[in-house]
Image (cartoon, grey):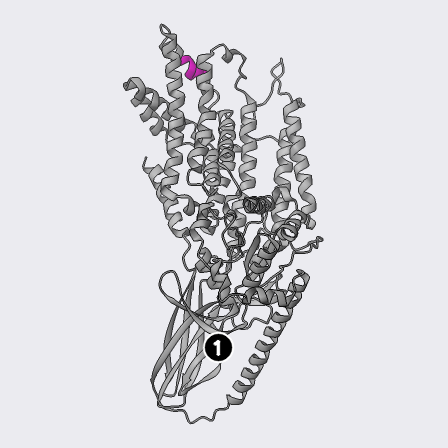
Amino acid sequence: MKKILSIIALFCTLTAAAQFANPVKFSVKENKISDSEFEVVFTAKIDAGWHVYGTDIKDGGPTKAEITLEKQVGVKPKGKLQARGNVHRAMDDMFGMEVSFFEGSATFAQAFTITESQYEVSGYLTYGACNDQNCLPPTDVEFSFKGSGKPSATPDSSKGEEQRSNVKEDAKAVAEVAEKVTAEEETVEEAEMPEEKADSMLQDSPSPLEEVGLYTPVINELKSFGEDNANTAEKGLWTIFLLGLAGGLLALLTPCVWPIIPMTVSFFLKRSKDDKKKGIRDAITYGISIVVIYVLLGLVVTLCFGASALNSLSTNAIFNIFFCLMLLVFAASFLGGFELTLPSSWGNAVDSKANKTTGLLSIFLMAFTLSLVSFSCTGPIIGFLLVEMGTSGSIIAPTVGMLGFAIALALPFTLFAVFPTWLKSAPKSGNWMNCIKVCLGFLELAFALKFLSVADLAYGWHILDREVFLSLWIVIFALLGAYLIGWIRFPHDEDEYDEMGEVIVNHRTGIVRFFLALLSFAFSLYMVPGLWGAPCKAVSAFAPPMSTQDFNLQKEEVVEAQFTDYEMGMAYAKQKGLPVMLDFTGFGCVNCRKMEAAVWTDAEVKSIIREKYVLISLFVDDKTALPEAEVVKESDGSETKLRRVGDKWSHLQRVKFGAQTQPFYVLLDNEGKPLNTSYSYNEDIPSFISWLNKGIENYGK
């Protein structure tokens, strides 16, 4: 039991590591260089999988690090903000430019020259951070320092440059505002709504938006719909139950379980030969015991993790690497490389205890012995199922899934005890069971690549881009077809002999194996066009995003937002009587572009959004200055100063919806209330379509 407890402890540790907090933690200090100079140093610790962008990124790229001074008395900046340390550089295909970024840690420094004996300086550093699943909105790190020093006698050589820089920035800000206003006017015209009418709708009453509750928090209402669809993939409990049932049937047909059935049933019937009903009752109790054991396993997983923790694990890089390695070990075992078994002393101890006891406890211990001795076949299946069910978004999913698995595993023991004559017509043990085991090994190998892909995206290794992933899957399923057709064999495959005892070389392929091989070969050919950019929607939920494709012949049009202003978009949606799709995005959000390129280009998705929704895209990194800075309170009581348009939308996302990463999608009615759960980064097109349709259905109600 110590090893089992160690495994549980390991998973719990991974859970704790996966919980999302602030992935970037900054500290600020003042560093004296001399009596007349000092610098403000910003030092960040960055969580694994995240990166912070540098200072030298061109316009149109992700959010760069830059400093803004709000107060400077007795000091003047010396040069520009500097990025120090291990600065990485890479070509970003999404933005078409080279970007600089930090991983693990980051340091920025701004030097100042003291011009008066007493000085004071304050302001904030703005930075952008992303991983391969989400991006944070532009975040400010405020600082304020005062002190005394020796005024520098050096002439202010940088004053002219500073003034020119300020003039340039002001001109740029004015141009951005003008461009934004023009874009919004054109957008309203395209939406067939005159600008004058939109303005009148917003000015008819002193605070029409507050009256309809557009800014009222709806965090609890959003949670009532369930977990974010980025991880649920619309798996209902019935789907999870059937998935567990299928896993149980596969485990039942393996060499570790099937041969035990006739022996176990015969034991119960012979032990109670004078009382046939008692034998049947014992067999039923045995089956129920199997169900109880595996349901308890599902409960342990639920109690140890919880639904939200398992959802976090599903995108945690360390966990995905661990599970990839575990699946590779299971696949090697299924393919015949070695036997993966629990210590024999465990089974012997439980079996000995079962022989010494009587009644229900004895039968329960016999069922527990079956669970231990069949681990080499059931363990890999159970491990895979628990992760898939645990990350489904439902807190009871692991328990429901294990219920389906246990019923499929236990049902034959009960049925054959009630109808013993069925045993004569049941398939005999043979090489067909090893064939099932080998096929499962191929599937475990394929799914191992899926988990490695998540880690590859998180760390930016680019060793498993989309075409590499598809190439490996094409080879894996082609080899599976070759095995089923009989072209390749593995260590545990038994030889067939003729009447003279000679090995049959040219054996015949069974009909079932032929059709399974046909499907496997067809699936491999289906994925081949994906190497040149074909969507291959059947594997879109498993393969890396289309943006990782080096060579793509497919150029699809992305659906564009009708509004980039929350209030105007909501007013127009109310006038037209349409629901709203709210898109929290960013100009520098790589994952937002991935979602748009992989999902929003789908013909059905474009049709639904354009015809049945009003799409409002709110850019949290919009640097357009607000007419006047606003100080607002966060949910934890802290105060935040909103200086830019992007700050306003970022604050709206945090306060109203309780989220802060992008992409983040919400469906709203005309009063600002959610119509379905939120949706984040998940390129599963059928899941996204189902999510959109559910919002339309709820709006109709």
Q: At 55% from the left edge and 47% from the top edge, which residue is drawn?
A: 699
Q: Is residue 184 magenta?
A: no
Q: Residues within 10 Å of mark 1 (few under 14, many from 20)?
A: some
Disc 1 marks which residue? 81
Q: Position of residue 168 (x, y in %)?
A: 58, 81
Q: Nearer the viewer, residue 441 or 454?
A: 454
Residue beneath the point at 65% across and 65% down: 194
For the stretch drawn in magenta, the main secondary structure is: helix
Q: Is residue 146 left or right of residue 383?
A: left
How many discs mark residues in the rendered view?
A: 1
Region in magenta: 262-267
- Pinpoint residue 666: horizontal percent, then vertical percent: 53, 53
From what the image shows, is residue 355 above or below residue 84? above
Can residue 400 be seen here? The reply is: yes
Q: Nearer the viewer, residue 453 or 140?
A: 140
Residue 241: x, y in percent? 48, 32
* Callout 1 amino acid: Leu
Q: Quadrant of residue 618?
A: bottom right
Is 265 covered by the magenta stretch? yes
Q: Position of residue 33 (x, y in %)?
A: 38, 83
Quarter of the image for residue 260 reads top left
Question: Quick one: 355 or 219, which is closer to the camera?
Answer: 219
Residue 365 in the image: above or below residue 214: above
